[in-house]
């Protein structure tokens, strides 16, 4: 049985608290005789794209190729260490080069400790193996999470196929749409918008692709159409007539729609932001913020918090 200590740290980082906190902090700590549960919460400002960029001396794209639980500098506090392959450095190539090579490690607080405890940090981003992400990494010292805006500065990149590029998706599944000069807007695709118009293509071998639009929105065959039809020499003509009727009822042409067009339908007509557009936008903003970005220190290694709760013993099973 695993012993779990939960730190519900929503968009909260002790070291940079003054820079990020905008409303108020509620901090509570409950020490129970049969275990420990620490609970902290904070209210933070939702950052604009300018604010995310101005606090991110390094922005890069990486693909997760490994993860493990580890500790830092002898502390018993566990971290989840993600190993990522660097695909492209968008901003801060010089600073990134000093600490990353073809791969780098991203440390996020929480995970399995050596004692068998599970530390859970509420709202902490969770990355998946083999997925590709755009990461906005903030400057200065940090203790729990190096991503700008806690979880606002990480996006999954999803390919559309057919050389149409990649769309930008939040960790909760919303696709980045609209105008990057306005408040960031994410819309979750609704498959119900397309199910009534499309059917899967039997001959398509591509996973998630091969959607075909039926111009007539033809309804499924009636149950009577599914009755067994046995071949007999004396009813060949009858069967042929039925086949001719079915063929005439089919649309003359069924047009193929791409993943990009299917996504547009599922987004209700909202225009998804492509990765190429986002990169250009980020680089332009970083150029304007260059004087302040150059002053920011950058480190991929956390400054570990004291092990303030690790003295508590886990609950013992009753005899």
Image (tube, rainbow, N blue to C red):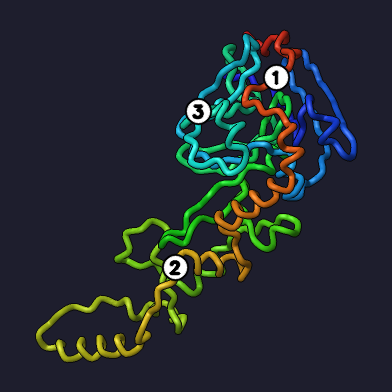
Tag 1 near tag 3, CB within 8 Å: no
Characterize the local packing of mark 1: few (<14), some (14-19) or many (20 or more) Cα atoms within 10 angstroms. Answer: some
Q: Is residue 61 left or right of residue 257?
A: right
Of the image marks 2 and 3, the number of the one nearer the N terminus = 3
Look at the numbered disc 1 and give the secondary structure of its residue.
loop
Instruction: Tell me how far mark 1 sits from mark 3, CA to CA.
Output: 20 Å
Are discs 2 and 3 less than 8 Å apart at CB?
no
Q: Is residue 141 above or below residue 130?
A: above
Image disc number at residue 303 = 1
Occupied quadrant, residue 315: top right
Residue for point 61% across, 31% down = 95
Where is the N terminus found, in terms of image quarters? top right
Give the residue pinned by disc 2. Answer: 258
- Local SS, label 3: strand
Decide which of 235, 100 is in the foreground and name it. Answer: 100
Residue at the disc numbered 3: 67
Residue 118, above or below 243: above
Q: Given the current orientation, which residue lies at the most extreme right position?
A: 24
Q: Which residue does the image show at 68% across and 30% down from the upper left?
A: 145
- Left or right: 153 with respect to 32? left
User: Can the viewer see residue 15?
Assistant: yes
């Amino acid at each position: 049985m695993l012993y779990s200590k939960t730190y519900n740290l929503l968009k909260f980082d002790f070291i940079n608290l003054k820079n990020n906190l905008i409303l108020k902090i509620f901090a509570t700590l409950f020490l129970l005789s049969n275990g420990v549960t620490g609970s902290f919460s904070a209210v933070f400002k939702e950052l604009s794209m300018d604010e995310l960029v101005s606090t991110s001396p390094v922005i890069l794209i990486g693909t997760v190729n490994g993860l493990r639980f580890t500790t830092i500098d002898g502390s018993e506090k566990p971290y989840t260490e993600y190993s990522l392959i660097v695909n492209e450095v968008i901003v801060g190539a010089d600073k990134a080069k000093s600490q990353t090579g073809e791969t780098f490690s991203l440390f996020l607080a929480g995970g399995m400790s050596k004692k068998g405890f599970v530390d859970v940090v509420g709202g902490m981003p969770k990355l998946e193996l083999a997925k590709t992400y755009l990461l906005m990494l903030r400057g200065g010292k940090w203790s729990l999470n190096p991503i700008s805006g806690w979880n606002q500065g990480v996006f999954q990149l999803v390919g559309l196929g057919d050389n149409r590029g990649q769309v930008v998706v939040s960790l909760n599944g919303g696709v980045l749409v609209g105008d990057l000069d306005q408040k960031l807007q994410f819309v979750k695709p609704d498959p119900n918008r397309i199910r009534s118009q499309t059917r899967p293509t039997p001959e398509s071998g591509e996973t998630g692709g091969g959607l075909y639009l039926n111009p007539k929105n033809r309804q499924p065959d009636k149950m009577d159409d599914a009755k067994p039809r046995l071949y007999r020499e004396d009813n060949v003509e009858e069967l042929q007539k039925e086949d001719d009727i079915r063929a005439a009822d089919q649309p003359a042409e069924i047009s193929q729609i791409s993943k990009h067009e299917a996504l547009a339908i599922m987004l209700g007509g909202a225009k998804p932001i492509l990765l190429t557009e986002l990169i250009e936008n980020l680089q332009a903003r970083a150029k304007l913020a260059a004087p302040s970005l150059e002053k920011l220190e950058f480190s991929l290694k956390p400054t570990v918090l004291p092990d303030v709760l690790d003295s508590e013993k886990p609950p013992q099973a009753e005899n």
